[in-house]
Amino acid sequence: MDYATIRNGLVSELYQHLQVPVVPTDTTQPKPPYPFVSYKFTTLYRSDAAVLTRSLVENVEPEDPEEPTEPVEPTEPIEPTEPVEPTEPVEPTEPEEPTEPTEPTEPMEPEDSTEPTEPEEPFFEYDIQYTLKEQPQMVLSVSTYSLDEAEAYGLAIQVQDWFKLHGYRYLKEKNLIVVNTTTLQDRSILIVDNFEKRIGFDVTLRTVHEQKARIESIEAYVLEGEKA
């Protein structure tokens, strides 16, 4: 789960749909002109529906890259040789007398070696892989700003509609599902001698997060007091 990718995608798509500034709620930058929208992730990761599975994966020893071979220089053509004259037939030799059979030697006793021998196969065929899958939830707080109450409410409804319908396909492609949206709330505040109209709501999103850990198989073990 990449928070920066999720945040940047939401801001970009909301701006294209609303055509008004979409800024972070907590910022030191100057306030944009009205109307505008602000956002803040009040809950970024709330673990839910964690499932741990174990599986066997094939253990393949990585192959060393082959070194490039030097090109072979072409050899000179071989000149034809002169024909060889036939030789005279060889007279048969007398058969040798049979030798006396030798006595069998005693078998050699194997040497006692305390060093463990190397295994024929340095790698097992399979390793164990653990996979942890979660469906964490995140809560996004959205507010709209205006000096006119009707404009602030109208903009808040457009943002909420985007999460419910217009932006649903985009969010699904990014592995995000809208779980629910809360009712619109009045968050207006008094600034000097005028009220800044703020209408807000919260959106709960769900995504998928996966972790994998691979554990090598135990090829050999030695018990105390025994030889390997």
Image: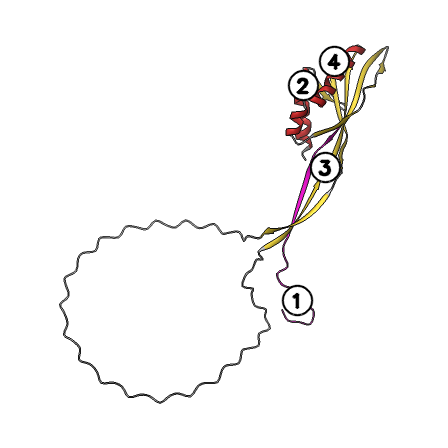
The type of residue carrying mark 2 is Tyr
- Distance, label 3 to label 1, CA atoms, is 42 Å
**For numbered disc 1, what is the local secondary structure?**
loop
Check if mark 2's residue and mark 3's residue have beta carbons within 8 Å: no
N-terminal of the pair, mark 1 or mark 2, is 2
Q: Report helix, strand or loop for mark 4.
A: loop
Query: For the residue marked with disc 4, what is the amino acid?
Result: Pro
Main secondary-structure element of the magenta-colored stretch: loop
Residue drawn at point x = 16 percent, y = 60 percent: 81
Callout count: 4
Q: Which residue is mark 2?
A: 15
Residue at the image position 55 percent from the left and 77 percent from the top:
111
- Give the CA separation, mark 4 to mark 3: 35 Å
Identify the disc placed on residue 222: 1
Q: Is residue 169 visible?
A: yes
- Residue 205 as seen in the image, left or right of residue 186: left
Residue 139 marker: none
Mark 3 crowdedness (10 Å alpha carbons): few <14, some 14-19, many ≥20: some
Q: Callout 3, which amino acid? A: Gln
Q: Which residue is mark 3?
A: 135
Q: State yes or no: residue 225 in magenta.
A: yes
